[in-house]
Image (tube, coloured by chain):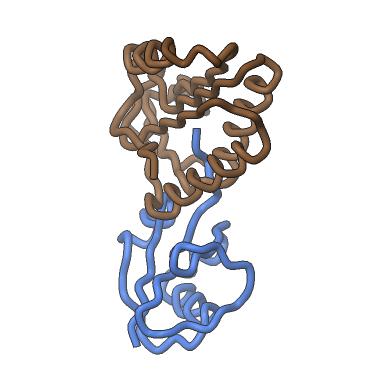
Chain colours: A blue, B brown
Amino acid sequence: MNIEVLFFGGLAELMGCHQFAMNNCTDTQELLDKLFLKNPNLKSKTFRLALNSKLINKKETLKNGDQLALLPPFVGG
Amino acid sequence: MKKVFVQGPISPSFIADAIAKHSSKVTIGAHDIFLGQVRADKIKGKEVCEIDYSAFEKMANEAFEEIRERTFEKFDLSCMHIYHSLGVVKAGELSLFVFVSSKHRAIAFDACRFVVEEIKANVPIWKKETYSDKTHNWVE
């Protein structure tokens, strides 16, 4: 099982990369918990999640090949 | 899908050309244009020199397309155009160009504001400000 995790804006700087792969996460919460262990500073950050480019507002089950993006608050313009 | 993102600042001549292209569309009676410009804000004694724009491009392009659809559903427009910068835009340069056209001014005014507010709220774009001393900050 392979999940592609994407980071944008200040979160990419915080994590030191724009993307990496994660394994063995059954749902988005489990993946986030693993990310928080990887970098505890992430926990205090405000962000939204997009699963396969669609915003999600609750825990979702993950399957092989999914892409999960962590999006800081939008500030276009 | 219409191309929205442009690399670097949006030039005034590009905007002038966009206006000129509408002279053949003689059912239009009103254009409204919004231009976003990078401010040299002073933050804790440091001045913003430039903003580096980045986006989740796939999702952003889909969001721009949805905004187009919603705007045409809501307002009786002849046409609309959105251009947004990616990459570095210096203070004083333009980073957003929204251009709507309709028969009458009230619709153009309302639609232009609607589009700008929708972009601000719903398009995954981020800004990294760089200051005169070369330090930077992510805008939130």
Task: Tell me the quarter of the picture where residue A39 sits.
Answer: bottom left
Report the side of A11 relative to A45 (left or right): left
Q: Eyeballing the image, is A73 above or below A40?
A: above
Report the side of B37 relative to A23 (left or right): right
List the single residue furthest toward the right.
B106
Residue A49 position, x and y percent, is 52, 64
**Near-viewer residue (B73 or B140):** B73
Task: Tell me the quarter of the picture where residue B106 sits.
Answer: top right
Residue B47 position, x and y percent, is 44, 22
Q: Eyeballing the image, is A27 above or below A11?
A: below
**Near-viewer residue (B42 or A33):** A33
Q: Eyeballing the image, is B95 above or below A72?
A: above
The quarter in which the N terminus of chain B is drawn is top left
Report the side of B46 relative to A22 (left or right): right
Q: Residue at x 37, y 84 (%)?
A: A64
Q: Eyeballing the image, is B73 above or below B12?
A: below
Q: Residue at x 40, y 52 (%)?
A: B56
Residue B88 position, x and y percent, is 31, 31
The quarter in which the C terminus of chain B is drawn is top right
Q: Residue at x 33, y 82 (%)?
A: A2
